[in-house]
Image (tube, coloured by chain):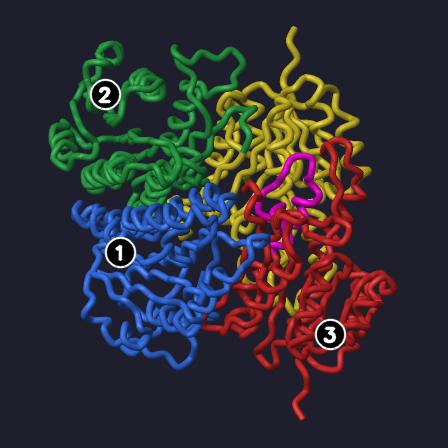
Chain colours: A green, B yellow, C red, D blue
Amino acid sequence: MATAPLSVIVGVGDGLSASLARQLAARGHSIVLAARNVDKFAPLAAATKAKSVRCDAASEADVAALFAGLAQAPDVVVYNPSFRVRGPLVDLKPADVRKALEVTAFGAFLVAQQAARLMLPAKRGTILFSGASAGVKGYPQSAPFAMGKFALRGLAQSMARELHPAGIHIAHVVIDGGIRSAMRPDSGDNMLDPEAIAASYLHLIDQPRSSWSWEIEVRPWVEKF
Amino acid sequence: MATAPLSVIVGVGDGLSASLARQLAARGHSIVLAARNVDKFAPLAAATKAKSVRCDAASEADVAALFAGLAQAPDVVVYNPSFRVRGPLVDLKPADVRKALEVTAFGAFLVAQQAARLMLPAKRGTILFSGASAGVKGYPQSAPFAMGKFALRGLAQSMARELHPAGIHIAHVVIDGGIRSAMRPDSGDNMLDPEAIAASYLHLIDQPRSSWSWEIEVRPWVEKF
Amino acid sequence: MATAPLSVIVGVGDGLSASLARQLAARGHSIVLAARNVDKFAPLAAATKAKSVRCDAASEADVAALFAGLAQAPDVVVYNPSFRVRGPLVDLKPADVRKALEVTAFGAFLVAQQAARLMLPAKRGTILFSGASAGVKGYPQSAPFAMGKFALRGLAQSMARELHPAGIHIAHVVIDGGIRSAMRPDSGDNMLDPEAIAASYLHLIDQPRSSWSWEIEVRPWVEKF
Amino acid sequence: MATAPLSVIVGVGDGLSASLARQLAARGHSIVLAARNVDKFAPLAAATKAKSVRCDAASEADVAALFAGLAQAPDVVVYNPSFRVRGPLVDLKPADVRKALEVTAFGAFLVAQQAARLMLPAKRGTILFSGASAGVKGYPQSAPFAMGKFALRGLAQSMARELHPAGIHIAHVVIDGGIRSAMRPDSGDNMLDPEAIAASYLHLIDQPRSSWSWEIEVRPWVEKF
């Protein structure tokens, strides 16, 4: 009997992770959900028959343990976490800037490195990074988020150039706009529907290697850019 | 009985147009194929039950006639044509540079304007432009193609900003690499499979308006970038 | 006695050309001013001891005659002309779109090709293109200008890659904002001072070949971007 | 008697810092040189009558002390440090990736924040970041450098948007290519002459606020890009 493919989603909490988990589970993937707080997504884990793993994405030990605990090489790994603080540059706390870099970019490196090690022997797999418009445009009063998301994009682009020829598909999704949720409902499609974003992630996963995208931007029809 | 959706594909000849026509026809779209030479794609027209229209995309009259002849507003319009000439800048013929701008960019404007006029009343529809890596990177000894494809991208980006809030989805596909065909077979996925490119076009068409992409790049896993 | 260096400025009318002519003349350059209407810049020609040449930059014959009439190979050639029309895409006149491509981009090719032919034997010279923010960002209701300025940037980038190794310095200046003039005075530095823009052109001309820029953006301190 | 303007150069060691120090000193600036190892640039400090300050740019305390020790608000602050390690992604040490982010990007934030605090009251000053082509293109086998330099560019762009309207000029210099030095001589202009790079820094410093650049790329004429 064939083993189900395995998807690992790091950073769970907003609607996107849930949509991804459900859509991948519906395709027959086994799901591993990793986040600092596993309690809050227990219903999602139950609904998708997912394994929950407590993991601080910026912790080298936690990330190593997460991947060491997998029963097989993952087919899909998604990195979502970020830390954001806003304010005038002169008022920012250095600790917050460091944390933005750690959570948004360094953790992405830790996860991607572990994923790549497991994927390389079979020369297949997809690693997806959830970016933001802040990764291509540095907004005022938002230096830490710009630093973290630019660094994440640099990581993704470097990895795409390095690992595509090794058969590992790397993609960076520029999510430009707010994501619709129960707490932020939206009846006019003015916010990103997480189901729609997830559909673009799945399209990236489905692309055959003769026609890979390393980046895609998604934004609501009414969003200024 | 519901009317079938209508797709208009301008510029037929390479494998991409054929793949698009087949995939859209398989979804139940009526297809209109427009090109300067209708004879050479008669088999494709037959296979997809498409209407063939002779059309020089850089001719205002031809493009107006093409859209005037449609039985309904199109749901999807794809613009493919380009003209390419290579060589040292000092040796280029001005007429070839003018032609590159006319076919690659001005014709795209003509087609997109007609398409937008028909799509705007219903506030829906998708207009897709086939771009190239030459539209984001100006290569040496290839000034005319750079000029045409950069201009095409400028048109697409301007239209996306203008027409997305009016409900018309605009997207520009950066095709980076050679496309596989009967004359250029490829057994290692080192060239773009036109079926795979077409699948990305269909994904763009499928995106709901809460999560639109205005651009996507596709390239083979082994392509340097 | 050493011959004075020669600068050719194509497209005269706004403050930038005048500032460039004065600053280059002050350095001892001979100046040639080329434009469709030579009468309106007679005072500038007198002040800079410039030769005036009537020239439609989009006319192959006019541009050929302009360069055939030079007494020596030019050291500096600047291309300024553009044609701009704004409005909803569906209301644009195709003739205006064609004109935008011809004046903004095709003319730039004609001028740059002639300049390159004269500069290549000595493997030296600088060709400068006056771009706009519209060349890097396609604004809504401004498709023709986007098309023209994107194409101009594609030309410049292709030429930079091709001709830098041949000793010809190519640069594209992204002018982002309105230019101050007698008709548009500005006491708060909120508009670009043409003397300041010209100073950046001169810096590009001065760069030794070990450290060339192919592009620079200039905008007022208060300009949003 | 007027006080001399003050320039602070953080990260000293390669030819660029020395050229900057000499060119700024020649203009009458007082110079402060800050680096982890002050001994190795004692001759430069003597030649430019500079004050030397031992400073680990990634240390919050060191950077705070550096700026607290200044006798006046600085007119120019330059940030040079970076940490680079190359190799296959799967073989990188997490500590090296963290260090690349700390030295290349976090230190830049620390320095820029202190500089901005001192510059804002007078609404004037220039902060310059030394970037690299790795900040706009993520190269394979070089993820840490890409992450650091992308983050640096995000910081610079965010600061430019935030602080330009407050009168502080922010600029990011993309240095694309190797820098010529005594240990790496070059007789064909195939490497960047640090004197030429420094001249572009001085041009940025000289720009009046009506025409500011937030970024400039410099590369040798023969460099592929």
Q: What kind of secondary structure does the magenta stretch mostly adopt? A: helix
Q: Residues within 10 Å of mark 3 (few under 14, many from 20)?
A: many
Q: Are marks 3 and 1 in contact (CB under 8 Å)?
A: no
Q: Disc 2 and disc 1: Cα gap in Å?
A: 58 Å
Q: Secondary structure at mark 1?
A: loop
Q: Which residues are magenta?
A: C132-154
Q: Secondary structure at mark 2?
A: strand
Q: Nearer the viewer, residue C94 or D207?
A: D207
Q: Is B98 rendered above or below residue A134?
A: below
Which residue is drawn at the image coordinates 51% and 23% (left, top)?
Answer: B206
**Does the stretch in magenta take in D215?**
no
Q: What residue sits right under mark 2 in the picture?
A: A30
Outermost residue on the bottom side: it is C1
Q: Is B72 rendered above or below residue A130?
A: above
Amino acid type, residue under disc 2 in the picture: Ser
Residues at marks 3 and 1, common chain?
no
Question: The numbered mark 2 sits on a residue in which chain?
Answer: A
* Res. C121 in view: yes
Outermost residue on the front side: it is D1
Image quadrant in which you'd find residue A3: top left
Q: Are marks 3 and 2 in contact (CB under 8 Å)?
A: no
User: Comparing marks 3 and 1, which lies closer to the viewer?
Assistant: 1
Q: What residue sits right under mark 3 in the picture?
A: C31
Amino acid type, residue under disc 1 in the picture: Gly
Which residue is drawn at the image coordinates 63% and 44% (left, top)?
Answer: B152
Q: Residues within 10 Å of mark 2 (few under 14, many from 20)?
A: many
